[in-house]
Image (spheres, rainbow, N blue to C red):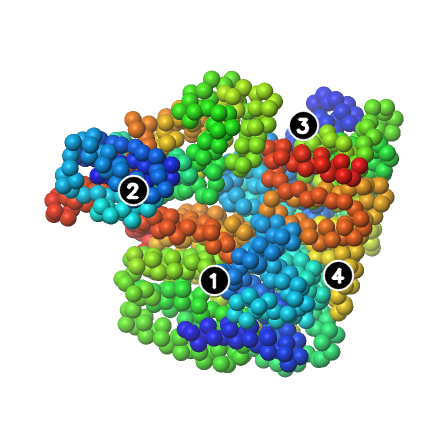
Amino acid sequence: MGIDIGSVTSKGVITKDGKLLSYYLLPTAANYNQTAQNLRDGLLVKTGLTQEDIAFTVTTGHGAGIIPFSNQQVADIRCCGRGINSIFPSVRTVIDVQGQSSQVIRLNDRGQVINFVVSEKCAAGSGRFLDVVANVLQIELKDIGPLSLKSRNPVTFTTGCAVFGESEAISRVAEGIPKEDILAGIHKALADKISALVDRVGLEERCAISGGGGLNIGLIKNIEENLGVQLLVPPQPQIINALGAAIMAEREFNKRRGQNVRDT
Amino acid sequence: MQKTAGKGLARVKEIYQNRPQRAEELKAEGKKIIGYLCIYPVLEMMTALGLVPYRMLGDMDEPITGADDYMPTIVCPFLRSLLDLGLKGRYDFLDGVVMAHVCDVGARMGHLWDVAVKTPYSHFIDTPHTIHRPAREHFKELLKDFQTTLESFTSKELSPKRLREAIKVHNQQRALVRQLYDLRKFDPPLISGTETLQVMIALMSLPVEEGNEILRQVISEVKQRKNGPQKKPARLLLWGSTIDDIALIEMIESLDANVVMDDTCVGSRAYFADVKLTDEPLDGLAHHYLAELKCPRTFREDNPGGTRKDYKADLEARFGYLGDYAKNWNANGAVLQVARYCDSHGYEVPQLKDYLDSIGLPNIYLEHDYSKAALAPLRTRVQTFTEIVG
Amino acid sequence: MYALRAYVDKMYEGGRKAQQEGRPIAWCMLGIPTPILTAMGIEAVFPENYGTICASSGAAASFLQRAEAEGFPNYMCGYCRNGLGYAARMADLNGQIPPEAPQGGMAKPALLVGSGAVCDARYKFFQALGRYLDVPVYILEAPSSGQRESLMEGAYERTVSFLVKEYKEFVVFLENLFGKKMDWDKLGETRSNRELDTVWWNINELRKARPCPMHSRDFWSSMSGALYKAGDAEEMTALYRKMYDEVKYRVENKIAGINVAEKYRLTFEGLPPWHSLGFFDQLAERGWNFVYESSYHPARPVEIDLSHISDPMERYVRANTRDLASTIDRDFEPDEAAEIKEEIKRQGFSNRLAARKVKEFQCDGALLHPLLSCRAFTVPLFLYRKQIMEVYKVPSLVLEGDIVDLTLFDPVAGLKKAEAFEETMDYYREVRRKEGLEW
């Protein structure tokens, strides 16, 4: 089992023999412990399994260390690498766009981290930027991507700051600029920041996207345009870290049992 | 030569929209263009050798992306923009760059530029921070080093005669700029703050003689025209960090205010003192480029080397010239604008406010991040301020 | 090394004692020629060091708030804002030390002596202090030419000549201000300070050993004596000699500076997170040994023959001012030194010069600590990251923080990134091995 406590949403995954069996999502409550328990309960109900059936649990994300049923905590960046590698073994660069930060991770053929960079303390570099503007425009998050692609005249956001960006969005609304143009602009601004992050560790193909950002078609298209590559998008991009955690759980369990595995 | 809009303000606006145009034409004719950062590199030495000095500025409309790889976000956004433009090839037409020790990040920019952008000729002038006598003498030695590399780059000799001629022409520009600024003393001013900034930016994009010609045209034009700025209750003095885009001044002048005077480095700072023609021209240049440029990066005080400390006298020594500006241009308010992360100007603010309060000049402090997005929230503040002073 | 820690306390105590006894004290900063003050019987106190004390003890928050209330922008250097807030409080109390000040506080000075060494913001800071302290501010010049310009013919001699004149004018000022004469013999006596520097340098050279016998935390807690040169040089040298013996013993017996086996050798770049030094203990548990740190490091002590120079000020300046060309000659073999100088003359920089420490200390990784309120230390980090990767395939981990604001450094997230970074370091070890590098 893999449990990933995110800043906004928490995810749980159960795998068997390296394959995804089931996944479950919940909004993160103030109590991480409780959230983790609820995730586990939800997963067990979905799969019809019991606690005893779970051989090993790896937790990642916030508060990973305080969850009592965790057998091991692993850094989210490493989980991300293993998770993507299990779905797309050809991926060597992952762009992980989360609610509070974005990271770009370079991987080897086994999903191990060979380099990474994280956008720091800056809402403009994470999904938060999109949240802020979606809020101003009163559009559901799931709709902002497709709507942004309808724009024919994107607004240019020149500020590097989400606070100023929010205020700029408000100004544009007041001027009567269509929502899709504002959304297109904000998607481009975030994509530009992310591409700059990619430059810092270098791009090696294939390249994939994960995290909540992987649900946003507007963001995907903008990043693809910037980088000149096609991004591989996993079917459920938000659960990649939890998936990776579950895979590492399995490997660790097998290692401890002394079975033959390729690597740790 | 490309067809241009002709003369005066129309030509100025054309250059403002497409700064490198003239430099690129001159380059095609075989001239060498040398980019310079800030007002501290000595322009006369470049002009004297037939080089065209070109002021390096940022672009408020260009989102910063590439620079993130070389500089953290917590530095002056103007300098980040500058480096970003370099990385994007916007300064590829330069044959050389001259940078100086203008501030912490500016001082490191020379090195970063060498590594990240690479321009054929490059020189860094370690301008001292004080105006102590040993500093002024040493600065002259540093200028001799600059002369050495310039001569090597151009394979020409920088003779005192050439240098004196260059000083005269640059002094002519300074005098013409002061004439232009005099026209802002009227009520309403004959030229707006927005237009003035465009003129200054145009000057910094042209060889000095061409700039002088445009200045004469503009002075004549604004004296004669009927559709100049409107009379407005607030007459403001604008102080602060590098301002190389009209967005902020335009915003202020769209409210009940005229910006009638400025103390910024893309404004009056480089022009309000002439270079003295000394026997050895480098003496006059060294004195001017260290002691007479009034940027806060230079440490100024009342009674240097003296043992008595008087805060009021100190404020007068450092900021008295702003009081004079306010008086002579009849300003009834001051706008202190600082780009976020600018240390040189940031540290000044409380003391400058003390001085302005002591002479009874109302003032407002605005912090921005060199983006147009940042200006919108400032609008209401400026509007309220203009209502107070007007 | 608590004996050395006591010296730092002594410094502030000395300042307060001097004030009580009517002896003059001066607030100074790193980079100013403190021995000149000492030779004139002036006690030196360091507000920037005090900033680290306030940060570690948690007292900084109220001083920072006060500075902001005074109108200083909140992006300015944390040490400076801390000092400004402190001075504002002193002004409230008519020059008395604020009761809430940690470690007994800093006594009111008779003089502020600053310079642009390390960063320009520092002399703007001292200038701003003039708002609260009605004492003279003297700003000393600190030449810092570019690399290319430093290699130009005669550049070093011109710098020496400049500083001699600059410092002599400073002495005239001090003599006028304090009504006493400079004791040139005392200034001329630099032997004990040079010995101090030599012992301290040798201690740090021992850290090249595998495993490294001394971790950065030990460096930071014992560097003050050599750094500030405000104490008795002979006493300090004796203390450092004892430290040398201890570190030598560790080398001979292969005892690491951390209590577990050394798995990774790191260099720390930037100013340390004084308020969260415990973070390094958590990394040490994972086998991370910090063998080098970019800041506060001594320059290689140089034996130069000054016997033909009679002017004590010139002797002082020559002994304490580096010449880039000679530094390159000393740090590299002749062929490589020539290549590096050629590189600098041609393109203005040399990656090999910039990256040399990771090679000398055989580092597996660099921990970069960008500081949200310090531009001088943060700007070079980004370039450094590229340079050590390009020349020696050494990766970097970036952990943001601030020098006084505790809330900006996140040790929990940092530890997670450190975990992922171990895989990165493992990978690049392989890369270096394939490229034939020694470590």
Q: Which disc, if any, is residue B302?
A: none
Question: B272 or C288: which is nearer to us?
Answer: C288
Q: Which disc, if any, is residue B17?
A: 3
- Please tell me how many numbered marks the rendered image carries: 4
Question: Is residue A216 visible from the viewing direction of this image?
Answer: yes
Calculate the distance from the C-alpha at mark 3 to the C-alpha at mark 1. 52 Å
Looking at numbered disc 1 in the image, what kind of residue is underneath it? Ser
Calculate the distance from the C-alpha at mark 4 to the C-alpha at mark 1. 33 Å
Q: Which disc, if any, is residue A34?
A: 2
- Letter of the chain that mark 3 sits on in the rendering: B
Image position of A103 (left or right of B307): left
Mark 1 element type: helix
Q: Choose mark 4 or mark 2, whichever is in front.
A: 2
Looking at numbered disc 2 in the image, what kind of residue is underneath it? Gln
Marks 3 and 4 on same chain: yes
Mark 3 element type: helix
Question: A198 or C147: which is nearer to us?
Answer: A198
Q: Quadrant of residue C115?
A: bottom right
Q: Position of residue A36 (x, y in %)?
A: 28, 41
The residue to which callout 1 is attached is C56
The residue to which callout 4 is attached is B311
> Mark 4–mark 1 contact, CB under 8 Å?
no
